[in-house]
Image: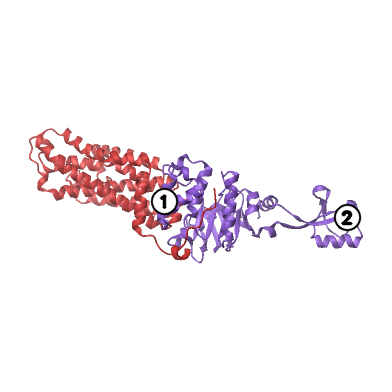
Amino acid sequence: MLSVRGLTKNYSGRLVVDSVSFDLRPGTVTAFLGPNGAGKSTTLRMITGLTPPSGGGSWIAGRPFRDWPNPGHVAGVLLDASAVHPGRSGLAHLRNAAALMGVPADRARQLLAQLGLADAAGRKVGGYSLGMRQRLGLAHALLADPPLLMLDEPINGLDPVGIRAVRELLRGHAGRGGTVLLSSHVLSEVDQTADRIVMIGGGRVVADGPIRELLASHRSLVRGPDMGAIANALMRAGVRVQPGPDGQILADAPSDRVSDVVYAAGVRVHGISDHQQDLEELFFRLAGDPR
Amino acid sequence: MSAPARYAPTAGPWDRASRRIPFPVLVRVELRKLTGTLSDRILLAFAPVVLVGVTVLVHIGSDDADEYAAAAAQINPTYYGVRVGHVLLHAVLIKLIAGEWQHRSAQPTLLAQPSRPRYFLAQAAVVGLLWLVAAGLQIATSFLVAPGAVAATGATYLLGYRPGWVVAVCLLGSLLTVLVALTVAMLLPNAAGALAVYFVAVPVMLTLGGLAPAVFVWLDPVTAAATLATRSAVSGPGPVAVSLLLWAGLLGLAVQRVLRRDVA
């Protein structure tokens, strides 16, 4: 659906995005993660043709975004909810966009109602809260019901009800075969919404894959009646150990190896489980300068 | 907030995405934006008043038959009307174009319609419409006000013998002034800044034209219209060519900026 190959952006000798490549497949929600200034927004702007890349390219269903005569039908994009003229009404903004995409004008009012902005439709956007602007931006992205959604921080400013609605919207979109690229700093939300992660740090992709696979630490948690004996057995076998949560031992080996070691040593255990790092842990581990 | 219902598609998204939106639709959207805010509508409502008012005021200031002795003198109020009377129309235009970049509303526009040349041409079409409106109003005002004003001083009304000349001065002069506004709006992606520059430039150019006409004629964007109206301080095609080249170059630079500007 979306292929990004070697996208690079150089601002006056400063490398902001460095050979970023990834692919998105239909039916998935991919989280685009990275610390502030990592190059996420620049990458999204290059994909959509708003910022000319210094190198590389991106293709949506085989064509660059800018080469689609009417790209709103292939990709709904929300990059910046505040990029709306504050003196115009939400309805006027959406009607203009609907006209540019060749979508019936009624669709604007329909989406405003569905996103909870019916009462504010005629009000100036300058008077909207951040959450209302996010909803307006989402309505803009959804106008032509495109198969690909690219959303930069779509839940900023939304209340818990709005966040849940966006989560359901994105999961529903992927469930119907759509593709979602979601940039967010709210890692707990990403954890609940995304199937895959593309993480960028210092302008480069530092992780790309299914979220569960990336979260797997290949370490194990062990507990038993004699924790000292377990630790000694593991260390004798060359497995590094450290204190884990709830008094358990965190062993630097997969659970099947730990099981073999303690069985061979004749040490009793009450439980061995795979240790899963959480997304925050993964984020901070990868967010450091990868070079 | 409930999940939006799907827009019932009649064809695949790829087909719809492959169909270019007709150019008149783009122009219609830009026209809607032109009147999109209350301040735009207020400016548009008062723009004809100022345009007509400036022409009338200059006529009122000329109450001596000697001041209307020649056709060149009789076209003077029209010439000044063209120079300063269209400023409010130009202000709306500057708000439209520079405001799109200042408020970054160019971003959703370019996400829906990513061709910058088409976006520029749609805005240029709106500028063209504004030019025709301004020129039309100026022509009508000139032919309605000038005969009475000239006759009131006891002079003979001469412009009636050369209506094509009056129309040409109005068309050319208003085109050149609207292009100045367009150039400023495209070069400065900030509506307040562009308006400030424009509203400083108009009186400064008038003042310089009065203080050092033989020098400023080479830089004045309206030199071609002034020459046509036989009001140029330097005769010959030199100043016209230099002025046109200078301002065409600035306009070209502005177009290039718009076509390549990073939409943050």
Name the residue that disc number 1 marks.
A95
Q: Quadrant of residue A255?
A: bottom right
Callout 1: SS? helix
Foreground pick, B7 / A47: B7
Where residue B86 appears, as percent x and y from the top left, is 27, 42
Tell me, yes or no, whether dots 2 and 1 are on the same chain: yes
User: Chain for mark 1?
Assistant: A
In the rendered view, does B259 fall on the left or right side of B69?
A: right
Asked whether residue B89 is in view, the answer is yes
Q: Quadrant of residue B54?
A: top left
Chain A's colour is purple
**Crowd tier of the residue under label 1, counting other residues whose Cα lies within 10 Å: few below 14, some 14–19, many 20 or above:** many
Give the residue at x 25% y 49%. Answer: B132
Give the residue at x 31% y 52%. Answer: B248
- Mark 2 or 1 closer to N-term? 1
Estimate the spatial distance between the alpha carbons at disc 2 and disc 1, rounded to whole Å. 68 Å
Name the residue that disc number 2 marks.
A230
User: Chain for mark 2?
Assistant: A
Where residue A134 appears, as percent x and y from the top left, is 52, 47
Chain B's colour is red
